[in-house]
Amino acid sequence: MKRYRNGDIWDFESGQGGREVILGLDGGTTSTICICMPLISLSDPFPDPLPLLARAVAGCSNHNSVGEDAAQETLEQVMADALSQSGSNRAAVRAVCLAVSGVNHLTDQQRILNWLRYIFPNNVRLYVHNDAVAALASGTMGKLHGCVLIAGTGTIAYGFTEDGREARAAGAGPVLGDWGSGYGIAAQALTAVIRAHDGRGLNTKLTSDILRTLHLSSPDELIGWTYADPSWARIAALVPVVVSCAEAGDEVANKILLDSVQELALSVKAVVRRLGLCGEEGKDSFPFVMVGGVLEANRRWDIGKEVIKCITKEFPGAVSIRPKVEPAVGAALLAWNTFMNER
C-alpha cells in the first residue's frame, strides 16, 4: 500500500480491506469531518437512518488559512482515523469525496487529486469539490441540483443544474468581503464599537456586551485583542452577541444583521439567475439548501428565515431545505451516487 509523508498514520492497517466502504469529507476553516459508510446496494430512497460506520473529527483543512502542508496532514489524519474506527483500511475504500473550503479553481482540485492518488490504490474513485458542494448534497441526499447557501465562519453560494453546469458567488474570504458570514457580521460589530468610541459612529449596546464577553475594560483594548490572533473563527464567535443586541433593540446591531441578510440573499440570487434555476419566468421549482451556524433557526432574530423571505419573494419556486444530515454525510452520499453511476 502506498504511503505519503506520514507513513505512521497508517500503521493500524493489516490484512485485507474487508467490507467495501465510501469516505466523505467536509473540510472547513473551523473543523474537518470524515464519514465512513458501507457501499450499500442501489436503493431509492436511502435507508433511514443511514448505516454510518465511523465519524472522525480534526481541525482546519483550508490551505488558504493554515498552509498546504498542514491542511494535507489534517485531511490524511482524519481519513485514517475514520477507517481505523470502522475497522477498515484503504484496501476496502471504493470512493472518496473530499469537499474542502479553499478549492476555488481547477488547479486547486487537480493538486489535491494528485496528492490523494499517492495515498489510495489506483482503483479508488476520487472526487474533489469545494465544501459548498457537500453542503448542497446534504440537503439533496447526494444529488447535485439546486443552490446552497453556507453561512458559518465564512459564506458562499453554490449551485448546480441537472445537466452539470455550476456557478458560485461570494466565498472569497474575509479580505475580499465575505459579507453576511459570521466573520463579516462580527467584524462589522467590532468596527461599530471602535467608531462609537472615537465619535465616528452611534453609541451601541455592542460596546458593553462585547467588552463583557471578552473580559475587556475599554474599547481601546479591542485593538490588541483583535490583532493578537485575527483568526476568522475567533472573530466569528462573537455573532451571538450581535444577535442578542439586535433582539434587545440596538439600532446598530439590527442594521448589521439586516445588511447581512441582503448580502446573503444577493449571493443566492446571483447563482440562481446565472444558472437559470428559476426558469424563464422565475417560478420554476429548485432546492434551496441552507447550512451554517449563522442560518440556524434558534433565535427570535432569525437570519435564515429572513434570507428565505428575500429569496422566495423573487423566486417563489425555491424550496428551502435545512438538511437532516451533516455536509460530511452529503459528501459520502455524493461519492456513492457518482460511483454507482460510473460503474
Image (spheres, rainbow, N blue to C red):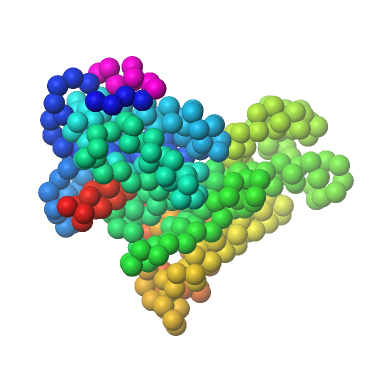
Please tell me whether residue 156 belongs to the stretch shown in magenta. Answer: no
Residue at left 12%, top 30%?
18
Q: Position of residue 276 (x, y in %)?
A: 44, 73
Task: Tell me the quarter of the picture where residue 27 sits.
Answer: top left
Check the image and name the residue furthest to the bottom. 281
Q: Toward the viewer: 279 or 299?
A: 279
Q: What span is in magenta?
A: 5-12
From the viewer's perspective, tell me whether residue 23 is left or right of residue 225.
left
Q: Toward the viewer: 283 or 174?
A: 174
Q: Quadrant of the N terminus?
A: top left
Residue 256 appears in view: yes
Residue 86 appears in view: no
From the viewer's perspective, tell me whether residue 249 is left or right of residue 35.
right
Residue at left 35%, top 36%?
116
Q: Position of residue 186 (x, y in %)?
A: 64, 43
Q: Position of residue 191 (x, y in %)?
A: 74, 44
Does 66 sit above or below residue 301? above
Residue at left 54%, top 43%?
153
Residue at left 34%, top 51%?
138
Q: Position of residue 88 (x, y in %)?
A: 20, 28
Task: Tell me the quarter of the picture where residue 207 sits.
Answer: top right
